[in-house]
Image: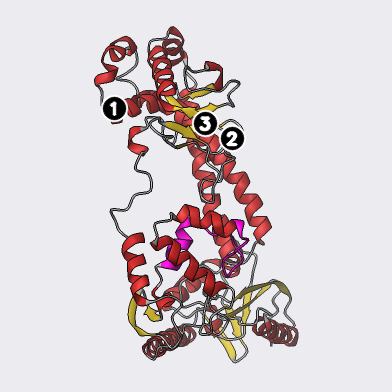
């Protein structure tokens, strides 16, 4: 007599969904529903992982939910089209058996027969099926890798992934509009034009990447140093020979670009080391970071409007007077009675520190989980971006508060020694000055100037945020 089951789980999975229509998963679910109806079983929930390999070890969200439900006693049986839909690695089978055994679930039904996980023969058969599936997947992977190498050695293009900029969908024919852009960018880069200037030009011209995104200096560098551009076939990061397509730029141009743009000695922030407040200043108009930006002989901090900096370009301030003002404010604060009182009377800080630490840990885990959900296709792009923005803002606030409470330990050697440090400030190295400033101040916002000129400093423009 057929046993009745009132809370059965149906699981379906397909490794590759090339069309995105989930037809394979639908067929599995339909067949399993029919089997449940034939047996008189009630299906509590269906779990489906589309376009996810069980052999890769990649997390399967629906499978994990099903395991949790079994573990918590919410499911009394499992229906699956074939055992290799559940597992292609023996280690996963053993985990599945352990969970089912603890929960008292022994009925795992496939369309080709029942598997009794408690019965020795049934478990042996499940293990044999898992081993066979693992070997099949491994053999498929080896054949795929060998085939990919053969294709690469023949010079044929790799067809997976986004279309490379400069080529049509066949990866061989030059794109009539993009190929000339690459030649123009290469010519100007070799003539000494900076990547930032080239990206700005491309954005002003309305030129997008092959995926419709704005260019960044990093993506432009990758494009101009990709051997594909001068007709070479790359496999697993190595050039293995010429491709079957015509080069867009010459090999000589390509090698010169690689030497120029990938030189380890190449630096894009040569003036940064002479700026004591680098990465500590924010624009009072748009909230973006201020960068070191000299003008002639004068050092300045500026909100830069560009493809990478994304500022508004509306704030500039001369560095020398600002650094003197900030240093004096920091040294005064180290000797201030208010600081001493705050440090000696704050008895709630330990509890707050623990609470903030827990909040930071929890939100960091949520960000990781959010990224996994986005990767696994459980969230749309707008849903992901909205949730990410909320979590990121909350994390920043928690970290800033945590830093304010915990930095007194880092600044302990400076507290009460402001006057002493003031006397020898000019003899300290820049790294020592920066360490002292960062121990006391987390950042400063620079407001728009009310009067022009480089002489003097309007203190009202500077809004520091103190750690202490």
Is 184 on the left or on the right of 105, as rendered? left
Instruction: Return the residue found at the far top.
Output: 337
**Is residue 223 found inside the magenta-colored segment of the image?**
yes
Residue at position x 67%, y 56% in the image: 383
Q: From the viewer's perspective, is the residue at label 1 or at label 3 nearer?
A: 3
SS of the residue under disc 2 = loop
Where does residue 105 sit, x and y in percent of width and height? Answer: 58, 73
Q: CA distance from mark 1 to mark 2?
A: 31 Å
Q: CA distance from mark 2 to mark 3?
A: 7 Å
Which of disc 3 and disc 1 is earlier in sequence? Answer: 3
Question: Where 104 falls versus 260 (above or below)?
Answer: below
Range of the magenta residues? 204-224
**Residue receiving disc 3:** 316
For residue 109, which quarter of the picture? bottom right
Residue at position x 75%, y 83% in the image: 40
**Are dots 1 and 2 in contact, CB under 8 Å?**
no
Q: Residues within 10 Å of mark 1 (few under 14, many from 20)?
A: few
**Residue receiving disc 1:** 432
Which of disc 2 and disc 1 is earlier in sequence? Answer: 2
**Are dots 2 and 3 in contact, CB under 8 Å?**
no
Question: Where 264 falls versus 303 (above or below)?
Answer: below
Observer able to see residue 302: yes
**Residue receiving disc 2:** 314
Residue at position x 57%, y 78% in the image: 175
Q: From the viewer's perspective, is the residue at label 1 or at label 2 nearer?
A: 2
- Which of the image's four quarters has the C terminus? top left
């Amino acid at each position: 007599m057929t046993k009745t089951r009132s809370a059965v789980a149906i699981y379906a999975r397909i490794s590759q969904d090339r069309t995105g229509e989930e037809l394979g998963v639908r067929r599995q679910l339909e067949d399993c529903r029919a089997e449940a109806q034939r047996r008189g079983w009630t299906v509590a929930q269906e779990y489906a992982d589309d376009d996810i390999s069980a052999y890769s070890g990649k997390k399967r969200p629906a499978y994990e939910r099903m395991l949790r439900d079994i573990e918590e006693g919410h499911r009394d049986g499992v229906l699956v089209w074939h055992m290799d839909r559940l597992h292609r690695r023996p280690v996963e089978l053993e985990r599945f058996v352990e969970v089912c055994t603890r929960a008292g679930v022994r009925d795992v039904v496939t369309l080709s027969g029942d598997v009794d996980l408690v019965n020795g023969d049934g478990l042996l058969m499940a293990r044999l099926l898992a081993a066979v599936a693992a070997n099949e997947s491994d053999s498929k992977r080896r054949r795929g890798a060998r085939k990919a190498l053969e294709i690469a050695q023949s010079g044929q293009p790799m067809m997976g992934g986004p279309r490379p900029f400069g080529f049509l969908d066949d990866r061989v024919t030059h794109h009539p509009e993009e190929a000339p852009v690459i030649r123009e960018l290469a010519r100007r880069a070799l003539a000494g034009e900076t990547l930032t200037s080239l990206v700005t030009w491309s954005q002003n011209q309305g030129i997008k990447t092959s995926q419709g995104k704005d260019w960044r200096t990093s993506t432009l560098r990758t494009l101009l140093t990709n051997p594909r551009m001068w007709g070479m076939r790359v496999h697993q990061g190595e050039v293995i020979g010429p491709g079957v397509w015509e080069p867009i730029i010459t090999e000589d141009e390509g090698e010169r670009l690689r030497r120029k743009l990938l030189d380890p000695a190449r630096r894009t922030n040569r003036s940064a080391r002479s700026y004591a407040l680098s990465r500590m200043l924010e624009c009072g108009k748009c909230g973006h970071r201020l960068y070191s930006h000299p003008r002639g002989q004068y050092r300045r901090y500026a909100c830069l409007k560009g493809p990478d900096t994304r500022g508004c370009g509306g704030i500039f301030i001369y560095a020398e007077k600002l650094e003197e003002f900030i240093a004096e404010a920091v040294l005064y604060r180290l000797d201030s009675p208010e600081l001493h009182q705050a440090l000696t009377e704050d008895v709630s800080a330990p509890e707050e520190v623990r609470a903030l630490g827990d909040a930071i840990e929890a939100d960091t885990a949520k960000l990781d989980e959010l990224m996994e959900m986005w990767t696994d296709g459980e969230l749309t792009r707008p849903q992901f971006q909205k949730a990410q923005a909320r979590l990121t803002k909350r994390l920043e606030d928690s970290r800033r508060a945590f830093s304010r409470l915990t930095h007194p330990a880092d600044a302990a050697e400076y507290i009460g020694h402001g006057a002493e440090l003031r006397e020898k400030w000019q003899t300290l190295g820049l790294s020592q000055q920066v360490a002292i400033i960062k121990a006391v101040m987390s950042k400063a916002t620079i407001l728009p100037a009310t009067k022009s000129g480089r002489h003097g400093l309007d203190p009202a423009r500077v809004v520091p945020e103190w750690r202490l």
